[in-house]
Amino acid sequence: MIVAELLRKKRDGLTLSPTEIEELITGIVHGSVTTAQAAAFLMAACIRGLTEAETVALTRAMAHSGTCYDWRSIGYAVDKHSTGGVGDKISLLVAPIAAAAGAIVPMMSGRGLGHTGGTIDKLESIVGFTVHPSDEQIERQLRRLGVAMFAQSAKVAPADRILYALRDETGTVESVGLITASILSKKIAEGAQGLVLDVKIGRGAFMQHINDARALAQMLVAVGQGAGLTVRGVLTDMDDPLGCAVGNWVEVQEAEGALQNPSECPADIRELSLYLAGAMLHLAGIASSQQDGMSRAAQVWENGQAYERFHEMVAAQGGRWQESVARYVSTPSLTVESPRSGYITGFSTRQIGLALVELGAGRKRAQDTIDPAAGVVLHVQRGNYIECGAPLFTVYATDKERIPPCAQLLLQSIEIEESPPLPRTSLIYEAVP
Amino acid sequence: MIVAELLRKKRDGLTLSPTEIEELITGIVHGSVTTAQAAAFLMAACIRGLTEAETVALTRAMAHSGTCYDWRSIGYAVDKHSTGGVGDKISLLVAPIAAAAGAIVPMMSGRGLGHTGGTIDKLESIVGFTVHPSDEQIERQLRRLGVAMFAQSAKVAPADRILYALRDETGTVESVGLITASILSKKIAEGAQGLVLDVKIGRGAFMQHINDARALAQMLVAVGQGAGLTVRGVLTDMDDPLGCAVGNWVEVQEAEGALQNPSECPADIRELSLYLAGAMLHLAGIASSQQDGMSRAAQVWENGQAYERFHEMVAAQGGRWQESVARYVSTPSLTVESPRSGYITGFSTRQIGLALVELGAGRKRAQDTIDPAAGVVLHVQRGNYIECGAPLFTVYATDKERIPPCAQLLLQSIEIEESPPLPRTSLIYEAVP
């Protein structure tokens, strides 16, 4: 393979063969393709686009660039992935729910990106919790509990790690083909056979238009099929923060509380968790339909089995729950009262995510450390009526000097008006296919 | 400047401002723009194209990325550049001719590229000749002789050196905008005010179609104007090797012989040299017209002043002519006879260039060393009749084992047929503007 010739082909809008793509990816990982050549490929792929066949080849090559797990001796492995939101702690619920209902969930997650949170950051707020269990421990846990939640290690899909960093550097993030290959290659490498993909749309999401989200979902489904992964895309609303908590520990706490007391769980968390867990159970062949999957999910949630599974997983990965609760109870906080009476009509959700990054709950650069205690708990959701002077939200942060500026930003992000908003309908827009 | 944002702009087909391009180039030279980002820019520029304004800004930024010479205190500096050919030793003639006729010629040249030769490689075949004179020596020589021929040093247009190497690596060589900026930035940096550009077309050139060559010439003229360099493009035929010698020392010897004995000079060398030197003298304001320039060029050629200037320059740059002649006289050689009688109807000129690279006259990789003695002297030109058994060409190389395979390739590159070809017309197609 002459790399420059291959780049010329893509540059001129021709299609690369699966073999060419595989050689390129192998070369990127082993160093025979230079960083400059990889960057040039990303730019050409971004401008010229990737065909479905090219994306399948890229997905396969990236998935097989490192360790590939295989859990078929245990059962059908199913996972859920979200394109990123604000207050999106749904993974913390659906993983134990699906496992409690009989699924095998090897959930390899990422860290926060831009204004959105990441499951790994949330889990690390639990004292002692390791997001880097050994391969043996992951297997042991999947056999015993059906669920393990862990970070992408250096040996899994190294091509994706290299290209992901390069895309950020070279302004080539926004490419449906590259996004698809990045998401799916990691899921194939983690050993998933089925994947429920939560494609988020709205003021707190990366995508604003349902057509874009549908196109991405369709691409993910088609490429997944080509690469041997069954994908169900679910287009969901991400206009408002999900639930009331946004941050790391505050979200873990909200998820744990929701699992413990289903009746007190915010309606949006409940709807989305049941739908996505139901889809996982359906994909895994445990449920006969989406509806049956949702019933089974509701059952293990109501009877406490999902709550129990959550704590078993936390303990298995070294997490010390009571110690965590005790540690965070003393986090400095500030409760802000509503400056006027009125209805909550909406949120500048992306701004809330960015305010939380400023507070320390997220990173501006990859090397930044985060404050696991940093977060906000909203005391209202869209449609609620609030009296002037009633508590509107509470901000938490270890460094209390960071609290007032964040509170100011958050206050500007909550819309309070005299008339109520339209009643909220379902968060679920559609499923693909 | 956020580099990734700037790359996104170019990626999406938007136009970069002169300031953005300048910041990008400065960043590339100073390291704040990474190699990956530079590579992504090149690919985006290659696919999206560069506007004339962008190319002007790129040319200026690259020219001013390092030392810029200024010879205006000596006179109007004029240069000639060729897009590359086989047997193209015309620079070795026009530089001393134009200088003998009164022009100031600071000629900064390159090395061989692909199947084409480079003036610097040719000059280095002269024993003792330095292609890296000091700035003081260049100036002294321009004042005394009006001519200096030298290689691009590290401090001249460093942005071009970086991007030139990256383009080769990333398959982004073929871009009119990038080619234009690369050629013109070096000429502006060397201090030229006027440039005659020999854009070659045909079997021995990089371009095969006159429309492509015309588009490049027009772009070079327009961008030169925008960047403060007066450019005259001349579209010329490069179907057959120029003259009879192809290689390094053999070409220097042919050029020297042509300067010494104008009456024995091959017609193609004579026509092209007079036209291009004439254009240089016209641009420099020494001649009142192209025709007048050609007359003046012919005059200093006929009266021996150009020949004398050539030797003065060689001596000034440390070259030892007699010693060179003595050294190369013992080069192993092989004369191949014509396998049949007939007319020479043409040459696979690119193949001849590639055969010479195999012989050691050129490089396959930048770090290869070359054999200055390696070369071929054709004993025929297009249209000549040759008897079976008469000498067809002589191959020279220090490593005599390389000679037979090269001779074989050369034999296949010469077309001998029963009927004569159409009579050859002018090598000059047209001038732009």
Image (cartoon, coloured by chain):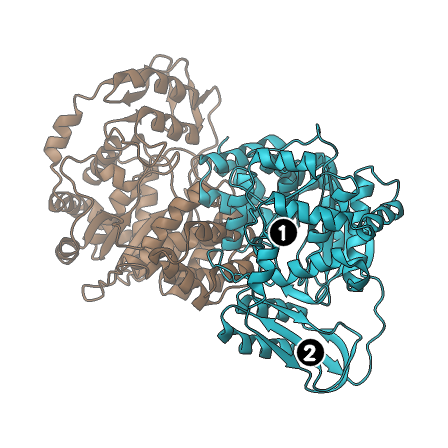
Chain colours: A cyan, B brown
Secondary-structure class at tag 2? strand
Task: Tell me the residue at 76%/60% (across/down).
Answer: A269
Q: Give A100 or A32, whichever is nearer the viewer.
A: A100
Marks 1 and 2 share the same chain: yes
Position of residue A197 in the picture relative to residue B222 (left or right): right
Position of residue B29 in the picture relative to residue A362 (left or right): left
Which disc is residue A175 wearing?
1
Alpha carbon of mark 1 to alpha carbon of mark 2: how far?
A: 39 Å
Position of residue A422 in the picture relative to residue B256 (left or right): right
> Residue A353, position in %: x, y?
62, 66
Q: Give A89 or B39, whichever is nearer the viewer.
A: A89
Q: Which amino acid does label 1 sit on?
A: Ser
Q: Give A31 or A361, whichever is nearer the viewer.
A: A361
Task: Tell me the residue at 25%/37% (across/down).
Answer: B122
Task: Tell me the residue at 83%/69% (across/down).
Answer: A424
Which disc is residue A386 wearing?
none
Residue A339 lies, with reference to residue B187, above or below; the image says below
Does residue B418 appear in this view? yes
Question: Disc 2 sits on a residue from what chain?
Answer: A
Does residue B279 appear in this view? no
Label tally? 2
Residue at mark 2: A392
> Residue A307, position in %: x, y?
74, 51
Q: Quadrant of residue A127?
A: bottom right
- Neighbor class of circle 1 (other Cα within 10 Å; few <14, some 14-19, many 20+) is some
User: Mark 1 or mark 2: which comes first in sequence?
Assistant: 1
Q: Which amino acid does label 2 sit on?
A: Leu
> Residue A219, position in %: x, y?
72, 46
